[in-house]
Amino acid sequence: MSPAADSSPGYFLIMTRILPSLVAILLTALGGPLAGAQTLPSAESPEDRAARLAWWREARFGLFIHWGVYAVPAGCYEGRPIDWTAEWIMRRAKIPVATYQTFAQDFTAENYDPEAWAALAVEAGMKYMVVTSKHHDGFALFDSKASNWNAVQSSAARRDLIAPLAAAARKRGLRFGLYYSQAQDWTNPGGAKWEEPDLTGGWDESQRGRFDDYLSAVSLPQVRELLTKFQPDIFWWDTPTLMTPERAALFTPLLALRPGIITNDRLGGDVPGDLKTPEQHIPATGLDYDWEACMTMNDTWGFNRSDLNWKSTTTLLRNLADIASKGGNFLLNVGPTARGEIPEASIQRLREMGRWMKVNGESIYGTSASPFKKLPWGRCTQKTHDGVTTLYLHVFEWPSDGRLPIPGLKSEIGRATLLASGETLQVVSERSDVALVVPVEAPDPHVSVITLLLKGPALVETILPRPDADGNLTLGPKEADLHSTFGNVVQLAGPAHDPYIAHPGAESWIGWEFEVSGAGAYEVIAEMAAKEAGARYTAAWGKTKLEAEIPVSAGATTFLPVSFGRIEVASGGVHQISFHPVKQGWKAVQLRRVLLRPLP
Ligand code: H79
């Protein structure tokens, strides 16, 4: 079946005839992000928690800064590029501690302009920043009494680099957060115990030491110093390796030094923190929790001089809209050089994002998650004030026919306007849905925003894929729920009008919900492409697992039908099917769509 069949008149006739009785109506009048009860510190009421997190939920957009001695080698050691993100170079290349410490002689920070950094964050439309006060290499960017491996005593910078940034940020109304690697330190003894059962791991004699001694000699005192000196608004823990509940309990009381502080979920020892932190990916759906997606602009956190794989401004803005539409914040990274310069490519993108935010910021700040499960052309955020709900439609794929359908919206629309110009748009009925009459040209090159004022809350009917007139069910890429894991990001690729799912990593998976009116049997056929032989996939249907080998196709985007076999649908209603790579000998594949073909 071709994708065009989805919009054939026959399909819609069936849809409109049987919809009222079969489609679940999802009434969503979402308030702020949902607060998981288990996350409440025992003494804090839900109201107090909401008040504490209020600025962060309003902010939506922040700057992450990864700065440290790793910016000196900048991704290269002994003339060879070192794989993985640049701030990991010490461990990836197993650089001896003494050698790594000599790099600090070139960590000059001579062009460091904290005022300009803070001004740039403001210009980008960001409301907070989080800077690495100490990364896994153990190098402290502040004046620390707990270890002389710090910017003042051991680097050419010879000064505290955190203090002036905190001041510059706050002067401009930005909230100020600190990143701190509490359980991993490749320089101070005992901190490099990575994966070592005796806690004395590492690759250099000078790293030897007990992890608990490291915590009490360096980590805990530094956390105390940071909280006392800088009164950070956010404390951003990272990599909780070997952090047991007992060890975590040494840290949590220190947080009282900064009332109102917000922490992330990476302290370890089962301490939930306030924020979940998907790294380098955007969750398929929102999370039932406050969350912040942290992402790089190229492929590294710390400065890597040869990484020129910059995301476009359009991609970055779409990521921001995508994240906001799922109720999260976007923490976007820059990796300054050893001299203290933010790469020009990052500055450019932040300025362009700022120009967009100046016009469209109200569609991001203080918004909550979309009432729609999916929209074919983009994303949606919403706000409710004095009983009036405003929907902000973020259109990524502007329609070429002058009509923007809003599938499933059942609320009465008060007024529709282009946010940038204020131009009013005509609202028309299209079959059972509403559509907007829009200009032929997209008003914005990145993301065009349309404001819809609703009479009452957002009422949205979730329309799931259903069988067509012949009983065939097509599960398309845009309706899929894409579940990424860190380092294994599933995403849409290819042309916007005919995308496919690029699925580069193991443990990620792809799911669909669909709806049928009664029992039946189907053959599961996936259109897939594999570059190498031997790729295997599982289609999971309840407890049934159907496995198939994906044949090698002529190219990464030449799709072949792969039959996974038969499934029995026992009753009418909503069902789920999902596709998972088989871990053993996993190989990259792409998936265009899935067809469920009725069987006798
Ligand atoms: O600061 C940034 C990263 O350096 C840090 N978090 C963000 C915000 C981070 N630390 N660890 N990780 C992210 C994930 C670790 C990935 C690993 Fe690996 C994969 C560790 C082991 C396997 C790369 C390959 C590093 C070691 C081997």
Image (cartoon, rainbow, N blue to C red):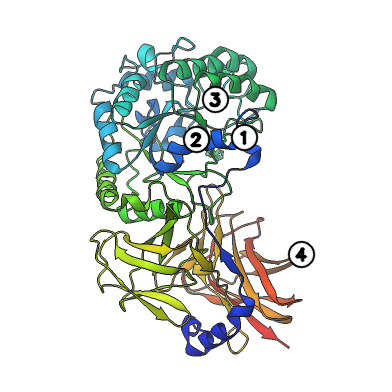
x and y, in percent, of residue 65 in the image: 38, 33
Give the distance between the C-alpha atoms of the residues marked 3 and 2, in whole angstroms: 27 Å
x and y, in percent, of residue 49 in the image: 55, 35
Q: Secondary structure at mark 2?
A: helix
Which residue is disc 4 drawn over?
543
Question: Which of the 4 image quarters holds residue 256?
Answer: top right
Question: Which numbered disc, 4 or 3, marks the residue that appears first in the sequence?
Answer: 3
Determine which of the numbered discs, if any, sits on residue 51 in the image.
2
- Residue depicted at 25% across the width and 45% down the height: 351
Question: Which numbered disc, 4 or 2, marks the residue that appears first in the sequence?
Answer: 2
Q: Secondary structure at mark 3?
A: loop
Q: Secondary structure at mark 1?
A: loop
Name the kind of residue labelled 4 in the image.
Lys
Question: Which of the 4 image quarters holds residue 89?
Answer: top left
Which residue is disc 1 drawn over?
40
Question: Which numbered disc, 1 or 3, marks the residue that appears first in the sequence?
Answer: 1
